[in-house]
Image: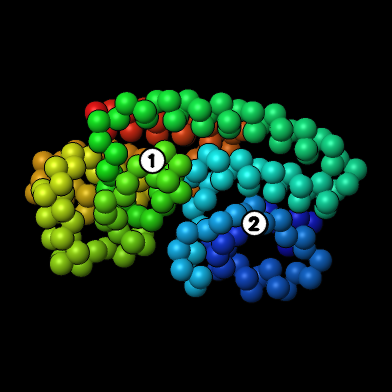
Amino acid sequence: SKADIFIVNGAGMESFLDKVVKQMAGLKIVEASAGLELLGAKEDRNPHVWVSPSLHIQQVRNIAEGLAQCDPKRADEYRRKASEYIEKLEALRIRMKDGLKGAKTREIITFHEAFPYFAREFDLTIAAVIEREPGSEPSARELAETIELVKRSGIKALFAEPQYPAKCAEAIAAETGARIFTLDPGVTGPMTPDAYVRMMEINLRVLQQALQ
């Protein structure tokens, strides 16, 4: 209620706050995903763009420019800080692309729909998604189909997320012998400037282990 500026991911991620935002006529909104090409149907866009370092770089630019327009006195500082951070993100992107070049397999099964942009960035294929929405467990039929897919394809790695229980992944692993690994989409984490970079570096190490 005391904020001057509200930075949102956009793409429908914060739709639960629409009513609150409409009541605050003077609040300036900065949408990080503005102008990005989104995956999914028009009514159901996938908002998890930040999991792709390339798209996250564009988000950083959007945030810096939004802050510069809302606070012109500090515009140069916002843009300078964004450029410094983008250098780190570009170096991260190169490290991750190089680190995944030698993967023996490029098919993965993920917990929910957080990783399509990530998979596209690093030339991975999402063979199946265990839970389309967190908290909505797959039906018995969907679970059986995923188990059959894992057996048929020989996929050896299932990727759960640290924010959610891995019960369904554990059931699939028990039936197929696949191992469970953890990929972090970064929806939670420490409030430190390098949190995103550290999270993605851990994801890289996990993928290198899992895809060998």
Q: Compared to 139, does 205 lie above or below? A: above
The location of residue 124, given as percent across then percent down, is 35, 42
Residue at image x 55%, y 65%?
Answer: 12
Q: Are marks 2 and 1 in contact (CB under 8 Å)?
A: no
Instruction: Name which residue lies at 64% across and 33% down.
Output: 86
Which quadrant holds the N terminus? Answer: bottom right
Identify which residue, 3 or 158, lies in the foreground: 158
Q: Position of residue 91 (x, y in %)?
A: 56, 26
Left or right, 171 with respect to 88, comes to left
| Three-letter code for the amino acid on which mark 1 is drawn | Asp
Instruction: Please name the residue shown 25% across and 36% down the image.
Output: 105
User: Would you say residue 89 is visible in this rendering?
Assistant: yes
Image spot of residue 138 (x, y percent):
24, 64
Along the line of sight, the residue nearer the viewer: 163 or 62 = 62
The residue at which mark 2 appears reads as 35
What numbered label is drawn on residue 123?
Answer: 1
Q: Residue at x 45, y 49 (%)?
A: 117
- Compared to residue 101, the image places residue 141 above or below, namely below
Label 1 SS: loop
* Between discs 2 and 1, the one toward the N terminus: 2
